[in-house]
Amino acid sequence: MSRAIFLLALLIGAHSFHIKEKPNSKNHQDITSIAILRATANICKNADGNFVTPKQLNPKTLAMACKKDAFKSNFEAGIKTIITHNVNTDLKHPFTAMMHFDGESFLDGKNLIIKGMEKITELLNQQKFEDARQTLGTIMHTLQDFYSHSNWIELGNTEPCTALINIEENIPNPADENTDTCDNTAPDTNTGAKLLDTVIQNKILTSGYFGKTKKPGKCSHGGPLDFTTGFRKSWNGINKDAIDASHGLLHHKAADVAVAATVQLLEKIWKSNNDANYFRLVGLHQDKPKGSRFSIFSSKSRVSDASEQKIENAVA
């Protein structure tokens, strides 16, 4: 695959919650921004009994409400930096299944998240905040993709899978390699792949395979570069990356649960550390994050216009 075709695929969302903004859809930038704002509001409220959540929640209003108004630009920079490392996961590891929970790589994906959380605590204790932001952005991406790439939403779940961030919990009922999960003989109805009735009835967890890794009887990821079902039916997968994706009718449900899961991740990292390290991690601190540039995209992230109505409404 040529690099130009691959980068174009990322722009149109071939493999993940979209990087490029699409109408009526949330991308990784949106999900990450909303989650950091929500989690930070909760942590500020825990630290200050008089905290009042702003009606319009954005980096500037939240910094003021947290009595850290002097650090509002650093807060924006911190969010942008974490977003950049999140997005760069698609650029650096586009076809590494465990980093996107593709191909039923549930145990490997969970292990990546758990080890990442442990590494973040270690880095914070060493005062290596830039490295911690990079690790945080990476595992956020993996966690968020679980809800778009698996059938967690199709199984009727409306809350996050807490097993992904808790080592003692088992991931509920993952499919084994010999279990068929999708009806690959069903006609193309432009509504994505059809999960087998037994998968829904028995609440079997699966995720889509991408490209040549797909096994007979398994589900495809779907998308413009996923030819697991042939070029004509390349959209016949189960991903919910955007409103026009294979299972795009469930995109908003997947994005909303991904936000909630990311909030849980951030709060667990906070509880494993302390207020000071958490606030510095997200940029609510006198030391401004150094930041990181997008490799092929504008460095202007979705949070740079902090008053953007789409994010404020979603956070409210």
Image: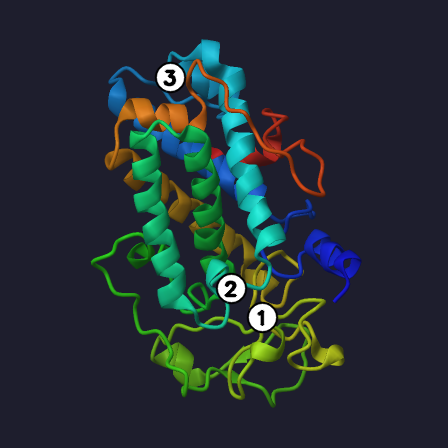
Label 1 neighbourhood size at 10 Å, few (<14), some (14-19), many (20+)? many
Q: Residue furthest top?
A: 70
Q: Residue 240's x, y, as percent?
A: 56, 61
Badge 2 is on which residue?
149
Residue at image x 53%, y 44%? 86
Quadrant in the picture for residue 43: top left
Q: Is residue 15 above or below residue 121?
A: below
Count every numbered label the image shows and give the total.
3
Q: Which label sits in the foreground, 1 or 3?
A: 1
The amino acid at mark 3 is: Cys
Q: Residue 270's x, y, as percent?
A: 29, 34
Q: CA distance from mark 2 to mark 1?
A: 7 Å
Badge 3 is on which residue?
66
Q: Say which element carries label 1.
A: loop
Q: CA distance from mark 1 to mark 3?
A: 41 Å
Q: Quadrant of the N terminus?
A: bottom right
Q: Residue 77's x, y, as percent?
A: 54, 25
Quadrant in the picture for residue 120: top left
Q: Would residue 264 be visible to someone looking at this image?
A: no
The amino acid at mark 1 is: His
Q: CA distance from mark 2 to mark 3?
A: 35 Å
Residue at image x 77%, y 60%? 5
Closer to the camera, 152 or 137? Answer: 137
The amino acid at mark 2 is: His
Badge 1 is on which residue?
221
Say whether residue 80 is left or right of residue 8.
Answer: left
Label 2 neighbourhood size at 10 Å, few (<14), some (14-19), many (20+)? many
Contact, mark 1 vs mark 3 (Cβ under 8 Å): no
For marks 2 and 3 on the same chain, the one whose residue lies earlier in the sequence: 3
Contact, mark 2 vs mark 1 (Cβ under 8 Å): yes
Q: Residue 159's x, y, as percent?
A: 36, 54
For marks 2 and 1 on the same chain, the one whose residue lies earlier in the sequence: 2
